[in-house]
Image (cartoon, grey):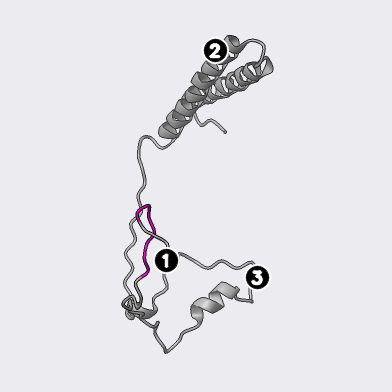
Amino acid sequence: MKPADPVEGMLISQLVVANEAALKLYQLAWLNNAEYFEASAKYLQLADRASRTVAMLTERLDHHRNRGQQQIVVQHTTTVNANQAVVTDSVVTGKKNEAAPSAKLLAAVTDKSMEIIEAEKQKEAVPVGGRDTKAK
């Protein structure tokens, strides 16, 4: 986790200890489940509380590292021919000289646009059976 300052070090150490406690309490809860129901229920309650503490500490650590700032990226893309538009972030290949199959597909251009299918009217009414309908 590599703490950058003392506050992060304390948060990380508390997070590790709370996680260990939660795992140990879950183990104790399931150890004697049939014999001592009330003790198992109490251990599960404590384990859930420790798990919530782990989640809260993780959120606080993330908040501390980002200094409370969120980053939102908004991209606006315009196309000349909207009927044949393909929007992608990037195409990554593992080889230097050979293009990826996805890159070949993106580069393929067709002259024919997609066919628009209009909804046809329902040709035949289909009866819906219920409690009051009789079989014919």
Above or below, 75 relative to 102? above
**Residue 130 in magenta stretch:** yes
Residue 36: assigned label: none
Q: In the image, which residues are magenta?
A: 126-132
Which of the two residues, 57 or 124, is positioned nearer the viewer here? 124
- Label 2, on which residue? 42
Disc 1 is placed on an element classified as loop
User: First in sequence: mark 3 or mark 2?
Assistant: 2
Dot 3 alpha-carbon crowd within 10 angstroms: few under 14, some 14 to 19, many 20 or more: few
User: First in sequence: mark 1 or mark 2?
Assistant: 2
Label 1 – label 2 distance at C-alpha: 62 Å
Q: Is residue 68 left or right of residue 106?
A: left
- Label 1, on which residue? 136
Foreground disc of the pair 3, 2: 2
Amino acid of disc 1 = Lys
User: First in sequence: mark 1 or mark 3?
Assistant: 3
Label 1 – label 3 distance at C-alpha: 68 Å
Asked whether the beta carbons under mark 1 and mark 3 sit within 8 Å of each other, the answer is no
Q: Quadrant of residue 42?
A: top right
Q: Quadrant of the C terminus?
A: bottom left
Amino acid of disc 3 = Lys
**Residue 6 in magenta stretch:** no
Dot 1 alpha-carbon crowd within 10 angstroms: few under 14, some 14 to 19, many 20 or more: few
- Label 3, on which residue? 95
Foreground disc of the pair 1, 2: 1
Above or below, 27 relative to 55? above
Residue 116 pos. (x, y %)? 35, 81
Label 3 – label 2 distance at C-alpha: 57 Å
Residue 78 pos. (x, y %)? 31, 72
